[in-house]
Image (tube, rainbow, N blue to C red):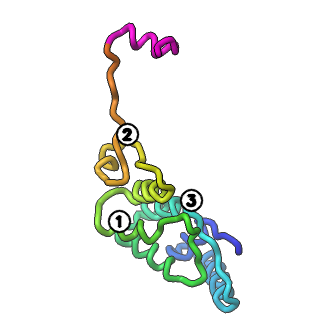
Amino acid sequence: MKALDTNALVRFLVADHPGMKAKTDRLLDEAAANRESFGITGYVLLEMLWVLKAVYKFSREDILDAVDKLTAMPVLTFEPSCPVHELVAMARNSNFDLADILIGLAARQQNWETTLTLDKKAAQSELFEEIQSHAPRNEDEENKRKVGGGR
């Protein structure tokens, strides 16, 4: 199996460059006719989410619809560790950033307890925990910690 890069998926979805869209359509049609599929990594999905939002100004719903469209295509196989279906389900029921949801879900899929973050909004999600600052008790303890002398 071969994998597809973000640009192929974006051109397929956006169709802003007729020549590239035609190439991608032809590739996908040939794969379907030959019962082949292409792999989609979680990294490609993450980049695609960003590109559709930041570059093409897709709405959240349009992005989620695009992801649904891709997951329904038999010629595309998302890597098993990519929680794409969970992403769409959670994103349709929350207003958390799509990339944050994907990051948090990927960590949870690894059976990691949580994802620590400085992002206050993400920290409101069940997938994240905000990093708390703990002020040193006094200046001597802070100096020991900085030089590694404290135990």
- Residue 148 as seen in the image, left or right of residue 118: right
**Circle 3 residues within 10 Å: few <14, some 14–19, many ≥20:** some
Task: Identify the mark at residue 91; answer none if there is no mark.
Answer: 1
Task: Identify the mark at residue 43; answer none if there is no mark.
Answer: 3
N-terminal of the two: label 2 or label 1? 1
In this view, the residue farthest toward the front is 151
Main SS of residues in magenta? helix
Under tag 2, what secondary structure? loop
Q: Is residue 54 visible?
A: no
The residues tagged by marks 1 and 3 sit, at their Cα atoms, a distance apart of 18 Å
Marks 3 and 2: in contact by CB < 8 Å?
Answer: no
**Circle 1 residues within 10 Å: few <14, some 14–19, many ≥20:** some
- Judge whether 23 appears above or below 121 on screen: below
Residues rendered magenta in the picture: 138-151
Marks 3 and 1: in contact by CB < 8 Å?
Answer: no
Task: Identify the mark at residue 118; answer none if there is no mark.
Answer: 2
The residues tagged by marks 2 and 3 sit, at their Cα atoms, a distance apart of 22 Å
The residues tagged by marks 2 and 1 sit, at their Cα atoms, a distance apart of 20 Å
In this view, the residue farthest toward the bottom is 33
Q: Residue at x 70, y 72 (%)?
A: 2
Q: Amino acid at mark 2?
A: Leu
Q: Residue at x 32, y 69 (%)?
A: 92
Q: Amino acid at mark 3?
A: Tyr
- Which quadrant would residue 10 be assigned to in this image? bottom right
Q: Residue 9 location, x and y as percent? A: 56, 72
Q: Residue 25 location, x and y as percent? A: 61, 83
Q: Residue at x 51, y 75 (%)?
A: 13
Could you say which is closer to the camera, residue 116 or residue 51?
116
Q: Residue at x 51, y 60 (%)?
A: 46
- Judge whether 114 appears above or below 8 on screen: above
